[in-house]
Every structure is written in structure tokens, then in C-alpha cells.
Amino acid sequence: MARASVSEASRIGDLASNVVQRLAPVSRRAGSLEEAWADIVPPNLREHCRLVSFRNGCLKVVASGSSYLYEFQLCKAALLEELQAQCPGVRISRIDVGMGPQV
């Protein structure tokens, strides 16, 4: 079995660095989305609803109770519009909300 040379190891380091640089914008967008969420969502809902994931333009949210789920459904369109305005680079197309464990 051949041993890796130093030049091969440095190339692997360069590859890893390139991957990190490509993922940095994704990380920044996620941070701005969480910050916008904290600014936009009313405190009473924020205590009982949380972000679960963001994938393919869909923001998934869980609510800890049916009354909070209903309340979130009532203001979901306004929240989506505001999140789209504050985070244009994220490209949110919809928000899905469901029941989840206690937040």
C-alpha cells in the first residue's frame, strides 16, 4: 500500500477549503433567516413555534399546540411576505406548519 505524499495531503486541504468557501453563503443565508424570523414573528408565537428546516424554497415550522398552529396559519401569508422582503437571497416560496413536540 502506497503512502500519501505531502503534496497529496495539501491538495486534500485545498479541496476542503474550497468546499467550506462554497458553503459559506448558505450558512450566512440561514443565519439571516433565523434573525428575520426572530424579528418578524410575534413573541407569543415565537415561544410556541420554531423553524425546523428550509429546503427547496419551503420553510417548515412546528407549533406546540393546535391553537398556536391555527394562529400561525392565520398570519402565515403576511409572515411569508415579510420574510421574502427581508431575505431575498433565500428565496422562500412557501411556509408549511405542522404540530410538533413542545417548543
Image: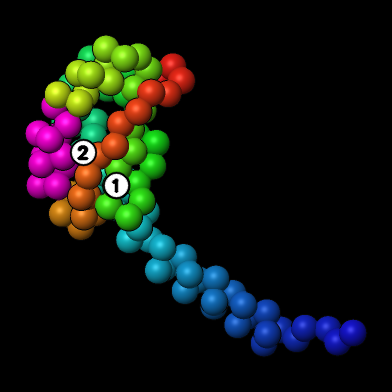
Q: Residues within 10 Å of mark 1 (few under 14, many from 20)?
A: some
Decide if residue 29 is on the left or right side of residue 99.
left
Residue 45 in the image, given as x and y percentages of width and height: 24, 19
Whether residue 77 is in magenta: the answer is yes
Give the residue drawn at x 47%, y 74%. Answer: 18
Disc 1 designates what residue? Answer: 58
Label pair 1/2, CB-CB below 8 angstroms = no
Residue 50 in the image, given as x and y percentages of width and height: 34, 28
Q: Main secondary structure of the magenta part?
A: helix
Magenta part of the chain: 75-85
Q: Is residue 6 visible?
A: yes
Q: Quadrant of residue 24?
A: bottom left
Give the residue drawn at x 11%, y 39%. Answer: 82
Q: Which image quadrant: the N terminus?
A: bottom right
Q: Is residue 28 visible?
A: no
Residue 40 in the image, given as x and y percentages of width and height: 16, 31
Q: CA distance from mark 1 to mark 2?
A: 16 Å
Q: Which image quadrant: the C terminus?
A: top left
Amino acid type at mark 2: Ala
Please, what secondary structure does the residue beneath circle 2 have? helix
Residue 88 in the image, given as x and y percentages of width and height: 15, 54
Seen in the picture, residue 79 relative to 7 is either above or below; the reply is above
- Please tell me the numbered disc located at residue 78: none
Mark 1 or mark 2, earlier in chain: 2
Amino acid type at mark 1: Cys
- Please tell me the numbered disc located at residue 36: 2
